[in-house]
Image (tube, rainbow, N blue to C red):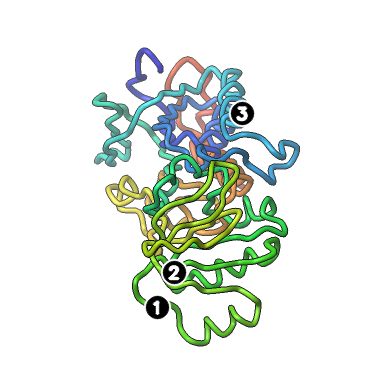
Amino acid sequence: MTPELPPAVDVLVVGGGPAGLSAATWLGRYRRSTLVVDAGQQRNLPADHAHGLLGRDPATPQQLLAEARAGLAQYPEVVLHHGAVSSVRKDECGRFCAVVDGTEVSALRVVLATGVRDRLPELAGIQDHYGTDVHHCPACDGPAAQDQVVIVLGSGDQVPAYAAELLDWAGTVRIVTDSADPCFAEDQRAALADHGAEVVDGVAEALVGEPGALVGVQLAGGELVEGDKVFFSYAHHPTHELALELGCELDHEGGVVVNGFQLTSVEGVYAAGDITAGLQLVPIALGKGTAAGVACATSLRGHPTHGASPAPPTRRFRSG
């Protein structure tokens, strides 16, 4: 925890996950005073491991965070604060005024990297199993289910396609609709049957077995659906409250709309990571964070730097 918040910085980064820390790293490289506010709610923290990251496969989420935070120490311009941003607005001078744990901080730019919140199954034992043998991301954890029996929970229209992803690895896929009413259209059920995926209509009640040694899912009527791993797909909600407050454009799923430089519809506000559209994977978040950090830093050419770091040239750069 930082003992004192800076009153003014060049850039406020909201979110201390892969996207936010990546953006902050590049802002530090450009010697821009940066405040990173981390609420400690990274989406993948419950997972045993993060996968598919070049040169770091696998690694625990805690290891990745610790290494990223340690790397920021080489950039004295970057301050990491463990807390929350409750509001942010743009004033008449074009500066951003944010309230961080009750203290007002001003910034020339903002990077939103607040991620998404997953809706978890209402299952007895979910907190003990989540991240070990209960997962939400097929691309992240599907390979660990190779040749196993996988149970998929969910009743939305997206579930059959979601379950089909797991056929790349699983030996058997069983969908528990977790609903008292039959779900899915007949053509969806027929397609699932063609691929050997089973559909069990019923309400999931509890996980059976110890973490790492799952036996299956018990239904409300007492029936046990056997399986080695559980994947779920209900809903995930972008944490876009600050984006809404700033007036950023959102897409039909509530994600923040950005251009190729991660700039939102509001000048001076960038967004990166799972809060934006596209694949929701750690390597993707790192890339988007890098793009946001570099674009944000270079947009500040010609603006003096807040803090003790040397200011970049004060002239505007133009071609010709």
Q: Amino acid at mark 3?
A: Gln
Q: Position of residue 186 (x, y in %)?
A: 48, 87
Real-space Cα distance between discs 3 and 2? 36 Å
**Residue placed under numbered mark 1 in the picture:** 182
Mark identifier at residue 256: none
What residue appears at the point 43 percent right and 27 percent down from the top-left corner? Answer: 35
Q: Nearer the viewer, residue 277 or 296?
A: 277
Residue extending farthest to the top is 3
- In screen coordinates, is 271 left or right of 122? right
Q: Position of residue 238 (x, y in %)?
A: 39, 52
Query: Which element carries disc 1, helix, strand or loop?
Result: loop
Q: Position of residue 39 (x, y in %)?
A: 39, 32
In the picture, the quarter occupied by the N terminus is top left
Q: Amino acid at mark 1?
A: Pro
Closer to viewer: mark 1 or mark 3: 1
Q: Mark 3: few, some, or many residues within 10 Å (few <14, many ≥20)? A: few
**Residue placed under numbered mark 3 in the picture:** 63
Q: Quadrant of residue 47?
A: top right
Q: Is residue 143 above or below residue 294?
A: below
Residue extending farthest to the right is 55
Q: Amino acid at mark 2?
A: Thr
Label whose residue precedes the other's in the sequence (2 or 1): 2
Label whose residue precedes the other's in the sequence (3 or 2): 3
**Residue placed under numbered mark 2 in the picture:** 177
Dots 2, 1 in contact, CB < 8 A: yes
Q: Mark 1: few, some, or many residues within 10 Å (few <14, many ≥20)? A: few
